[in-house]
Image (spheres, rainbow, N blue to C red):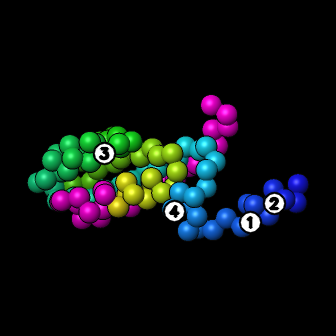
Amino acid sequence: MQKDKMSIISRTRRDILKGRITDKSRHIASVLVQGWPDRIAEIERELTRLAGVEAHGTNGSGKLILTLEAEDDAGLVATMNRIETAKGVVTASLVYHHAEEMGDV
């Protein structure tokens, strides 16, 4: 039991971000994207082409709600970076993040 505790404690943020932890898990996040209102339809089309990204609606003021799914934190961070740097996106805010162990699949 002590060995298991040590392995959890020795994990670092960098290990998670670099994908060095091999536990099977699934990460789901919701993101609020603020884009230029006149380009929001184009932004939605571009972002939903990314793997694991799904759009859930927009409004006339340029706000777009997305959900992201990834196998690890590194994949989630990479997708967030692509969203934030997409043409027409002003800002992207992480609203919710959930990680769940998948066990033996």
Does any portion of residue 58 appear in the rendered image?
no
Find the distance from the CA under tag 3 to the CA under tag 1. Answer: 33 Å
Please say if the residues under marks 3 and 2 sit with CB atoms less than 8 Å apart.
Answer: no
Q: Give percent across and percent down for residue 55.
A: 32, 41
Disc 4 marks which amino acid? Leu
Please say if the residues under marks 2 and 1 sit with CB atoms less than 8 Å apart.
Answer: yes
Q: Give percent across and percent down for residue 71.
A: 51, 45
Disc 3 marks which amino acid? Leu
Residue matched to label 4 = 17
Give the numbered dot on residue 9: 1
Q: Which residue range is magenta in the image?
A: 82-105
Does any portion of residue 78 appear in the rendered image?
yes
Please say if the residues under marks 3 and 1 sit with CB atoms less than 8 Å apart.
Answer: no
Disc 1 marks which amino acid? Ile
Find the distance from the CA under tag 3 to the CA under tag 4. Answer: 19 Å
Please say if the residues under marks 4 and 1 sit with CB atoms less than 8 Å apart.
Answer: no
Find the distance from the CA under tag 4 to the CA under tag 1. Answer: 16 Å
Please tell me which of labels 4 and 1 falls first in the chain. 1
89 in the magenta segment: yes
Please tell me which of labels 2 and 4 falls first in the chain. 2
Please say if the residues under marks 3 and 4 sit with CB atoms less than 8 Å apart.
Answer: no
Q: Give percent across and percent down for residue 61.
A: 20, 55
Q: Is residue 12 above or below residue 80?
A: below
Give the numbered dot on residue 88: none
Q: Give percent across and percent down for residue 1.
A: 88, 54
Q: Which structural element holds mark 4?
A: helix
Residue matched to label 3 = 50
Residue matched to label 2 = 5
Q: Which structural element holds mark 3?
A: loop
Please tell me which of labels 3 and 1 falls first in the chain. 1
Disc 2 marks which amino acid? Lys
